Amino acid sequence: MTAIPTFEARGDAFAIGVALGQRAGHALREVVPAIARFVELERDWGGSDYIAALERAGRAVFPGHMREIEGIAEGACVPFDRVFLWNCRGDVPGGGDQSGKTEAAGCTSFMLPTVDGRPAVIGHNEDGEAEEDGHCFLVRLVPDDGPAITSFYNPGLLPGHSFGWNDHGLVQTINHIRPFDQREGIPRHLITRAVLSCESLDQVVALLQRKDRASGFHHNLGRAGDGRLLSVEAPASGCSVRSIEGPHCHANHLVHAAFAELEQPDAPSSLSRQARGEALLAAERAPDVARLLADRETMPLPIYRKRVGGEDAGFTLATGLFEIGTEAVGWRVHHRLDDEPLYQGRTAIGQPAAAPTALS
């Protein structure tokens, strides 16, 4: 079986959720409940008034995406409360890192703006728990309303929180951040799912500037035909939007000046990856993003995290690479960067794309 299988789901939000839950049901029933982060999240926050407040906020603003979560639960034969709690893992005080394995929730992104007519580039390592490797998917969703999207999908979580793109040519990759400012509001996984329904970068920024968010992420954003690359840090307490004018790297802590005073933990892997990424970009006139994302020089805390055990609790589950031009997005998805891509294609603005199929 392909290391990252793919499938397409169509219909209303609930039907799409059911399809996601059915395909990821085994992992959601057998793998996720054994992950330390989930065990301690359920122990500390399951059934709490705080989670109930997040559910109310989500239903008030994004009822369709809440129906998607209901569908995931139905399709996987798992109680809704457990699936919703998993989707709130970064929204609770402390960011859901009660297990102490803060480094598992990682990711590294590089952005290169357009130069001399060449397409802009966004590259992203999706890091997570090693237990999820082999249980994730590349999904294409064709909803009854809104654009079709393609996204890397972790079992039980809404598509959009990792890396993905839509048929408007919008690309989003996500970096987990850990500031201590969580509060009652809209769960951040609903926000990232909603981003992939947007037509423009300006719509995305307006969404990320909402003041009723429970927590947030760092978003790397581009859109075919727009010309801009945006780095947006959006914790619960604010939103900082930076237009990227030169090679840029982001790991898993806030680096924008706007949040210099916001308390956040010093995560060793994130600090190591950020420093190494910035050094690589400073040393190279024409960086190759795929090669940067495969860098392991700073062992035991490298950018490319394919080792299980040791000091680094994280694991690179997949890599997404995007070339964002004036009319289309060229993309490819790797399970391992030293192998050929599992999937690659081109999404032209306004032209429906086919579901990804494995390369022969």
Image (spheres, grey):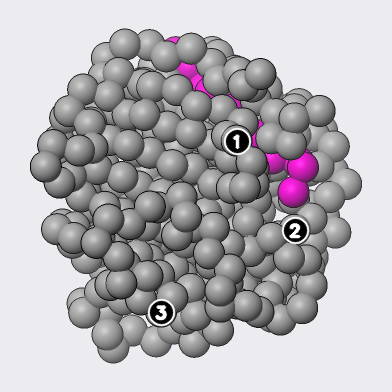
Q: Earlier in the sequence, mark 2 or mark 1?
A: 2
Q: Which residue is mark 3?
A: 275
- Indicate which label's residue lies in the foreground, 3 or 1: 1
Q: Earlier in the sequence, mark 3 or mark 2?
A: 2
- Indicate which label's residue lies in the foreground, 2 or 1: 1
Q: Position of residue 154 (x, y in %)?
A: 65, 44
Gap in Å between the C-alphas at discs 3 and 2?
24 Å
Q: Quadrant of residue 17?
A: top right
SS class of the residue under badge 2? helix
Q: Which residue is mark 2?
A: 130
Which mark is drawn over residue 330?
none
Residue 136 in the magenta stretch? The answer is: yes
Circles 2 and 1, Cβ within 8 Å, touching? The answer is no
SS class of the residue under badge 1? loop
Identity of the residue drawn at 48% across and 12% down = 354
Identity of the residue drawn at 63% across and 56% down = 316
Q: Which residue is mark 1?
A: 340
Residue that lies at the very extreme toward the right in this rendered image? 30
Crowding at dot 3, Cα within 10 Å, few <14 / some 14-19 / many 20+, comes out as some
SS class of the residue under badge 3? helix
